[in-house]
């Protein structure tokens, strides 16, 4: 029978390390357990939140409802040819363990996404991305359970409406679907290596790699990330706190007149993506600490919990960053982190 615990401290369950309590907390290991949970009074009468690894969440206060922690496990090959392998991954598998599983078998496609914390089930929510690759490049389909009807649903890649740190699961289907598994299509030969992101090429060179491979890209990405991003087990954080803003080309050109070195990456529709880390650094926040919270010294886009901070303290710092960036650049930063 499904277990529901009461008054659970969520500190070990979120990478910011915020000590808030959940009124109810339940771990689900199978789709059947989830369906059983949806029939309980705790599910029916309370608000609920699905939790993976808690690496993209900020709890501002106690959660007065039911936390559903996904623990579904399993990686299964469901189809294979000489060229490709199709794998189905249960939502509670850790993303980085999955990457290593694939790198060890020489399956190509997700090596650039090495060392991203959290679970496979959360990966489609914001279409995780790093170093020139996004989940959408390899995802075939998502399986989920409608939390209202208990119906099993399948979403194809295009039905997920993926965008930059975006998908249908953040909009029309927000909090409506429990993602139970993802299916990925990976290469067994003719790999499409992506080393275009500057730091990868430089790191491979520094590592003396002459022939690029799935393993060497993964190793390079791990090295880059370890140098820049704080390890949540040492210093609480949730990766990039904000998304990189996309502004109009006209706005970008007018900013260039005052800030000649402003970086920008051209995207479609006459728009430019500006690195939020640069904007935040220009406002003087990089490495700054206010009591228990601060802005990471190596990456201004990362807010850190130095020492038992509350969610409110992190949120307040984020608000101060938003206002100073708005004042200086007329750009409103949007959080990437889910604020609860
Ligand atoms: P959680 O934080 O537990 O949940 C995130 C959201 O997904 C919540 O809204 C939750 O309700 C929902 N959710 C979780 N699981 C399910 C499910 N099974 N069904 C339905 N909804 C669900 N992200 C990147 O994209 N690229 C990076 O390079 C990157 N680097 C990071 C580095 C660090 C050090 C950290 C701490 C975070 C980083 N992140 C990065 C952010 C984070 O790792 C990803 O967003 C990750 O996918 C979150 O997974 P999670 O299991 O921890 O999700
Ligand atoms: N920059 C600065 N100062 C800083 C940080 C960055 O000036 O303190 C500028 C530099 O110009 C640098 C540029 O920003 O060249 C880009 O920096 P970086 O390569 O570190 O990437 P990012 O844009 O800050 C994004 C993702 C990361 C992902 C990396 C690598 C977002 C919001 N963040 O960061 O994802 O790992 O690229 O692809 O898109 C996450 O989502 O949690 C995350 C860590």
Image: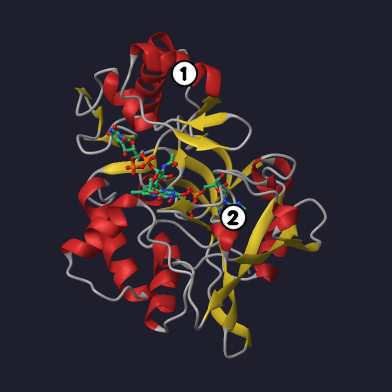
Q: What secondary structure is found at the residue carrying circle 2? A: loop
Residue indicated by mark 2: 124
Q: In this view, which residue lies farthest toward the bottom? A: 82
Q: Can residue 307 be seen at all in this image of the molecule?
A: no
Rendered image quadrant of residue 186: bottom right
Q: What secondary structure is found at the residue carrying circle 1? A: helix
Q: Residues within 10 Å of mark 1 (few under 14, many from 20)?
A: some
Q: Earlier in the sequence, mark 1 or mark 2?
A: 2
- Name the colouring of the figure: secondary structure
Q: Would you say 132 lies left or right of 64 here?
A: left
Q: Residues within 10 Å of mark 2 (few under 14, many from 20)?
A: many
Residue, x 47% and y 24% (percent of image)?
333
Residue indicated by mark 1: 253
Q: Is residue 33 above or below residue 331?
A: below
Q: Would you say 48 lies left or right of 306 here?
A: right
Mark 1 beta carbon near ligand 2 (under 8 Å): no
Q: Is residue 259 above or below residue 10?
A: above
Q: Can residue 223 be seen at all in this image of the molecule?
A: yes
Nearer to us of marks 1 and 2 is 1
Task: Give 208 or 7, whichever is nearer the viewer.
Answer: 208
Residue, x 70% and y 61% (percent of image)?
144
Where does the image place residue 194, in percent across and percent down from the top left?
43, 62
Where does the image place residue 285, in percent across and percent down from the top left?
26, 22
Residue, x 49% and y 29% (percent of image)?
245
Q: How many marks?
A: 2
Query: In whole angstroms, how far apart are the C-alphas of marks 1 and 2?
Result: 34 Å
Q: Would you say 133 lies left or right of 103 here?
A: right
Q: Would you say 51 lies left or right of 323 here?
A: right
Where does the image place residue 32, in percent across and percent down from the top left?
70, 70
């Amino acid at each position: 029978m499904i277990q529901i615990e009461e008054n659970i401290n969520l500190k070990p369950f979120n990478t910011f390390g915020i000590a808030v309590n959940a009124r109810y907390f339940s771990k689900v290991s199978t789709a059947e357990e989830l369906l059983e949970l949806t029939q309980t009074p705790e599910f029916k009468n309370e608000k609920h939140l699905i939790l993976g690894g808690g690496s993209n969440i900020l709890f501002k206060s106690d959660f007065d409802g039911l936390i559903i922690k996904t623990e579904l496990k399993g990686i299964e090959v469901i189809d294979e040819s000489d060229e490709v392998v199709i794998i189905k991954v249960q939502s509670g598998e850790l993303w980085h363990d999955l990457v290593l599983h694939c790198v060890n078998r020489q399956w190509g496609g997700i090596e650039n996404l090495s060392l991203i914390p959290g679970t496979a089930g959360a990966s489609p929510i914001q279409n995780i991305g790093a170093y020139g690759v996004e989940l959408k490049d390899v995802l075939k389909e998502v399986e989920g359970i409608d939390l209202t009807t208990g119906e099993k649903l399948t979403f194809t890649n295009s039905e997920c409406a993926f965008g930059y740190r975006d998908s249908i699961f953040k909009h029309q289907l927000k909090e409506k679907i429990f993602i139970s598994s993802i299916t990925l299509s990976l290469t067994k030969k003719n790999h499409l290596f992506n080393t275009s992101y500057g730091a990868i090429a430089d790191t491979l060179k520094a590592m003396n790699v002459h022939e690029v491979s799935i393993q060497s890209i993964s190793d390079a990405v791990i090295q880059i990330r370890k140098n820049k991003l704080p390890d949540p087990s040492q210093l609480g954080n949730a990766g990039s706190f904000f998304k990189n803003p996309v502004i109009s080309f006209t706005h970008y050109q007018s900013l260039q007149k005052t800030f000649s070195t402003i970086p920008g990456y051209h995207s479609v529709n006459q728009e430019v993506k500006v690195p939020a880390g640069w904007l935040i650094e220009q406002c003087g926040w990089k490495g700054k600490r206010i009591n228990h919270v601060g802005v990471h010294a190596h990456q201004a886009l990362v807010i850190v919990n130095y020492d038992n901070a509350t969610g409110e303290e992190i949120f307040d710092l984020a608000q101060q960053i938003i206002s100073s960036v708005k004042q200086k650049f007329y750009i409103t930063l949007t959080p990437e982190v889910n604020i609860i």
